[in-house]
Image: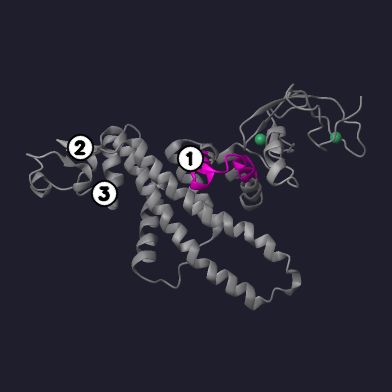
Amino acid sequence: MIKDIPTREEFEEQGMTLLNHAWDTVVERLFDYPDLKEFGESIEDEQKDHYDSASQKPLAIATALLQQGTEFLVKAAIAEVSPFLLIAGNAQSWPKKCDTTDTSFSAFKTANAENLIRIHNTVATTRFTDTFTRNFAQMRRVRNTVFHSVDRNLRFSEKDIIQSILTITSELQGPGKWMVSREKYLESTPLAAFVTEGHGSNLVREFQLLIDLLENSDLQRHFDFDKRQRRYLCPECKLSCSEYYPDIEPRTAQLKPNSQSSCTVYCVVCRATTRVLRKPCNCTPCRGNVINSSKEFDPECLTCGEIPKY
Ligand SMILES: [Zn+2]
Ligand SMILES: [Zn+2]
């Protein structure tokens, strides 16, 4: 009998951990850059070139982690049907005495990355899209180059890596799932053993980066967020940010549905829906008309953050 058989959830957790590490590398750089901008005009072209070229190394590693993580997620989708499909080779190549002694799954050779899509698409009820299959093959080529060779022509960008992580998560876990996965990951880091609060504020900071970095089509596709639509303060996120980042204004909520008479705003970061009153704010010079009316919070204007006096 085969023992210690891994589950879909275990492959998935491993895959998401690697994707989150890739994400960490990219957002850390994006957070650093505005600080560097404080040097203002004193940044020389030479310094910028050095910064950009030195960034290629961590971004290359992030791309390799992304590929490795995706491989685990594909294995998870195969394990959903049966983990035994991941065992490679014919019975002769299996570990010695596996037919007479209970043998751990990890002692078996598992399918090569190049065969995973074929295995999945043969047994799963829904096949991967052609785009995903092409991207998977491309990522594998890049990863092999990063780990086994040198290619001076390979260039990595923060935006490409972020887009890939979101596309992969949307394809394998469903649209809009990244924020949930990211929050779960932040709550599971070693530091979370001591710091149990503040994950919400990190999510807000990261999403604010994404609003500037990504196209509107990406934000709509992966978060159902429209950056052309008016953005309001989210009371829940404001509370999360108040301790660690009190200067942040989390404008992460939007009217849902987006209409003159809509009485709720939805926040893409904390996924909270807040009831609002559609009444003009009387704090000058604010022209907002979306006032928090949920009982748990002050009746503040979600445009200017002040409490109107009626
Ligand atoms: Zn929120
Ligand atoms: Zn106001």
Farthest-out residue, bottom: 46
Provide the residue designation for mark 2: 3
Q: Residues within 10 Å of mark 2 (few under 14, many from 20)?
A: few
Mark found first going from the N terminus, 1 or 3: 3
Q: Residue at x 45, y 58 (%)?
A: 63
* Quarter containing the C terminus: top right
Q: SS of the residue at dot 1?
A: helix
What amino acid is found at the position of numbered circle 1 in the picture? Answer: Ser
Asked whether the beta carbons under mark 1 and mark 3 sit within 8 Å of each other, the answer is no
Q: Residue at x 48, y 67 (%)?
A: 57
Provide the residue designation for mark 3: 115
Q: Please determine whether, in this image, residue 36 is positioned above or below residue 233.
A: below
Mark found first going from the N terminus, 3 or 2: 2
Q: Residue at x 38, y 60 (%)?
A: 143
Q: SS of the residue at dot 2?
A: strand
Mark found first going from the N terminus, 2 or 1: 2
Is 219 situated left or right of 300 in this image? left
Quarter of the image holding residue 33? bottom right
| Residue 121 or residue 53, whichever sits in front | 53
Q: Position of residue 124 (x, y in %)?
A: 30, 34
Q: Main secondary structure of the magenta part?
A: helix
Can residue 228 be seen from the camera position used here?
A: no
| Residue 297 or residue 213, whichever sits in front | 297
Q: Position of residue 216 (x, y in %)?
A: 63, 45
Can residue 157 be seen from the camera position used here?
A: yes
Quarter of the image holding residue 53? bottom right
